[in-house]
Each structure stands twice: as C-alpha cells, then as structure tokens.
Image (cartoon, grey):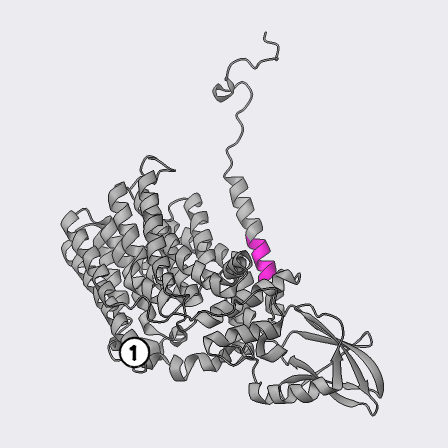
Amino acid sequence: MRDPAPTGAGGWGRWPILVVIGFGLVVGGAPLLVGPPGGDDAYYHAMRAQQHAHCWLGGVALPRWYPDLNAGLGGPEARAYPLVPLSIHAALALAANDGVAATSLATVLIAILAGCAMLRVGRRRGASPAWAAVAAVAWSASPYLVIALHERVSLAEGWGLAILPWVLDVSLPPRPASRGEMVEAALAWAVLLATQLPLAVMACGVVAAFHLAGPRRERLVRLVAAGALAAALSAVSWLPNAAALGRTSSSFLTEGAFDFARHFLPGGLADDPVLGRQLLLALAGAAAAGLGLAAFDRRAARGLGAAAVATAFMATPLAAPLYRYLPGLGWLQFPWRWIGVAACLATLAALRSPRRGLRAVAIGLLLLPLAGVSWTRWRLAPGAPLRPGDSGGAVARAAVRYGVPPILPSFPAYLPRGVDLPAALAAAGRARALVTAVGRPSPDRFEFRCDAPAGGSVSLPLLAADGWEVSVDGRRVGWANESGLITIGVAPGEHRVVARQTLLPEDVAGIALSLAGVAALGFLAWRRRPSPPAPGSAADETGPVPGRPTS
C-alpha cells in the first residue's frame, strides 16, 4: 500500500499529533501527581541515571564503571546494561539535576513516544487521521505498557515497546522492499538492540516467522542485510552487554526469582498476586483481540491477529517445553514479557483491518484490562534528590529513601564473578587504613599513596573486576582478587599507586564494529544520491541563469 499523501504536519495531521501527545502526557504523567515511580526497578534506573551523568561530568564519554557503587568500591554495572536507556536517563538526570526526576520524565516521554510511533505507522499504512490517532492512543495506554512504566518501572523495556511499532512496520512483509526501506529497518533494529535485548530477540522471532512463511529471496536478502547492519551499528552496546554475562555473576539472572518456570500465566508471580492478576488480564485482552481479528478479518489483519495469539501463547505454561529445550530462550526470564509483543501485534492488526466494528471491538478488548491496573500502587515518598554532581556519600544517603542500605549497591547479577560483596565491604575498611587516596579521583582513575615498611601485599579499596590497569611508581604491575578487592605486591617503602579502568576487548570490538556500521550507512546513503544531469540533457535545460552569458 502506498504511503498517504501528506496532510497537516509532515503527513501525520496536526490534530492527531496534538491528541497523541496530550494523551501521552496523561498516561505517563498523571501517576506522578502522587509521587515519583517507586516500583521494582525504580531505584536501579535512578541510580544508573545519576552515576552515568556523574561520569559524564567527570569527562568519561562512554562510562563502563560506576565509581560510587558499593560504598565507593565501584561496580561494572554499565557494561551489562544497554546504552540507549543509560544515555537518555543520564541526559534527563543532568537536565533535572536529579536521578529520581529522570525516571519520572522517562515515564512521560515513553508514553508519548509509543503513541507517536503507532501514529506514524498508521499514517504510513494509509489509515485515516482519526483511526491512526485511536490506534496510537490505544497503544500508549496498553495495559502491559502502563504496568511496565508505573508498577514494574521497567524503563528499558518501556523504551523498547515504545518503538516496537516502528520496528515491526519496517520489517514485516512486504517490507523491506527497497534499499531505502532496508536502511530504515537497520536503523530501527539498531535502536532496539541498544535498548533491550530480550525484546529484540522476541521481535526477531516474530519477523523471522512472517518472512519464512512466505519467502521471497530478494526481500529475505534485504532483511538479512538490514539485520547485519543493525548489529554492527549497535555493537557498542550489545557486545559488552553479552560479554558481561560471562564476566559477572550472570547465573543469578536465570535462577531463583528469575527462573522462567516461575513466571508463566496463569499461576506465576505467586509472591505478587496483584501484579500476576493484572498481567493475566492484559494477556487475556491481547489474546482476545488477536483471536477476534484472526477469525473475522479476511485481509492483512488476519496474519497479524494470528501472530498476536501465538505470542500470547508464549506467556502460558503450554510454552514451557520451548523454554526448556530451545537454547537461550530461558534468558528471557519472564515469559509474560511476550504480552507486550502480543499487544503491539494486536494493535497493528486492528489498525490494518478495514472493518470498523471489528477493529473497535479489538481496541476495546485491548484496553479493557486497564480497569484492573493500579497506576499509583508503588510511589516514592518525598526525599533528597540523587544529584549527578554530589559526592558518593551524599548520593548514598539520598538513596535511603528507596529503602536500600546507604552503600548504593550494585544489582547482584552485575557483580564481578567470584566477588562476595559483604566480604569486600569488610576488607575495604582494612584497605583504607593502609592506603590514602590522593587528590580528587576521576570516575575511572584512582590514585593512592601507600606506605608499606615491610612490603608485601596491599589491597586497594576498589572492587576487583576485569578492566583494571594498575601501576606502582609509574610501572605497570599485575594484580589479584583478594576478598573481592584489587590486591598488589609492593616492595618496602612509600609508593604511588594508580588504578585505571580501561576498555575491555569487547568494548573495543563493539566501538570498531559500530564505526564500521556508521561508515557502511554513510556509503549506502551516498549511493542513493541522484546523479547530476549530463550537460545538454533535458534535465539540464532549466533556462538561462542570471549573470551567465547566453548564445
């Protein structure tokens, strides 16, 4: 279907944009009147926003180490987390001078972005401005997205869900049908890969299923090329993320509360029955909408509706064998994450349906579970802000409002492998009695003065992790992990010790691949430029040019 002729602002229509933005402000911002987000992941997002912004203020453009975590021992949290949310939240923290305010602003912006993304898809697919606006509003207020923003505070997933309509629109058949569409698909997937890997894996499965169901060689080649270019462009994010799973206590992410077997619906989330009931209602709404469209629509919406039902099935115990035997699927952790994909597919299906009554019923079924969502269940009490420019002690004291100890701890899964945090914290007191910090440390460089009359082993108050480079009196030395701290051997006497965080091989490889991706993208853009008309050709006959003699 050809894209519609432009109307109003950039082809979207001015009033639909205003409606979508206004509704996004309500969906994302109304709960903030009660207080900032205080749900499951709110603290970690606020902490990362503050620490990432703190590193930027210290002159570190690509932070891979957060210095104030774990009572000043630091932590490699940034390596295991996607780059797009870190950067957005850090920018918001700098703008608001508060990591807590950054999470609040993010909930508003995600709801607006989700609506705008669906509106763009609707207008590109030829939907009327009114119907495109309805679908956009429905997606920005979809129950699963609201739960992700205001209860779970899963902001990385929220950003990924917000752009998911764009990603699917440029990837599902009949697209990509040209080189330009291939480039757009590559950009969309690159952003998603640098935003949330589990959602990218789920979306990849959906797109692959559609293309394999009706393969066309040229389209498949373009899609594979787009995927390769996207992987290169976003390698600076996902390559360190994936490598960090092997360098940290990553088994934590697939055990205990993260074991996929505990999170199928119905029956999952026994420790939080309220959230479990809300997710089950969202699952039922997405599945019912998809089933209705698959059963009663005879055009493009039928396939999308069937896909919505299939992805909803992945959240139920019936999909347990797939999780158990399909390699890597268990890393998705929470099968109910498929609800977001199912809801997006159902909304896209309703958008494509030509039957007004059917699409209205489908949207109603999608939104009906909102009646059971507790928008303001978890709100944060007033307290001190997490300012990017504050010292580690001040930030740690401010973080107590989240109910965490005043040490600004890492997420346990992101601790370096083999590090016992309580043992490291206990050893840090002894280490600080033997070494003295010199000057004001930068986020990734620390200098100490060490007086060791008898020589021997000396521990530095820094968490032992890959990436440290240590020098003693200007000479590089090796180090060992002792009680979770960097430990070096020194000769008798006074010494100057410098510890510096360096880029790991996966960081360097990711940066190099991303630069290569940018170069490839630039080459493709250059190839698309129209050639200048030949002198004397019809295209060159534009009439006399002022100031030029004519024969």
Quarter of the image holding residue 140?
A: bottom left
- How many residues crowd mark 1 within 10 Å: few (<14), some (14–19), many (20+)? some
Quarter of the image holding residue 510?
A: bottom right
- Count every numbered label the image shows and give the total: 1
Q: Residue at x 36, y 53 (%)?
A: 25
Foreground residue among 105 and 384: 384
Residue 201 pos. (x, y %): 40, 65
Instruction: Single out the residue that lies furthest toward the bottom.
Output: 454
Residue 291 pos. (x, y %): 18, 61
The answer, for residue 514, to whether it is visible in the render is: yes
Quarter of the image holding residue 26?
A: bottom left
434 w.r.t. 149: above or below: below
Foreground residue among 508 and 407: 407
Q: What's under tag 1, amino acid-wise?
A: Ala
Horizontal arrangement in the rendering, residue 402 relative to residue 475 (left or right):
left
Residue 102 pos. (x, y %): 48, 61
Horizontal arrangement in the rendering, residue 117 relative to residue 359 (left or right):
right
In magenta segment, residue 453: no
Q: Residue at x 51, y 65 (%)?
A: 99
Q: Quadrant of the N terminus?
A: top left
Label 1's element? helix
Range shown magenta: 509-517
Q: Quadrant of the C terminus?
A: top right
User: Which residue does the numbered mark 1 point to in the structure image?
Assistant: 320
Foreground residue among 540 and 319: 319
Foreground residue among 537 and 407: 407
Horizontal arrangement in the rendering, residue 383 relative to residue 6 (left or right):
right
- The rendered magenta stretch, by its main secondary structure, is classed as helix
Instruction: Single out the residue that lies furthest toward the right.
Output: 493
Horizontal arrangement in the rendering, residue 233 relative to residue 119 (left or right):
right
The answer, for residue 121, to whether it is visible in the render is: no
Q: Residue at x 84, y 83 (%)?
A: 494
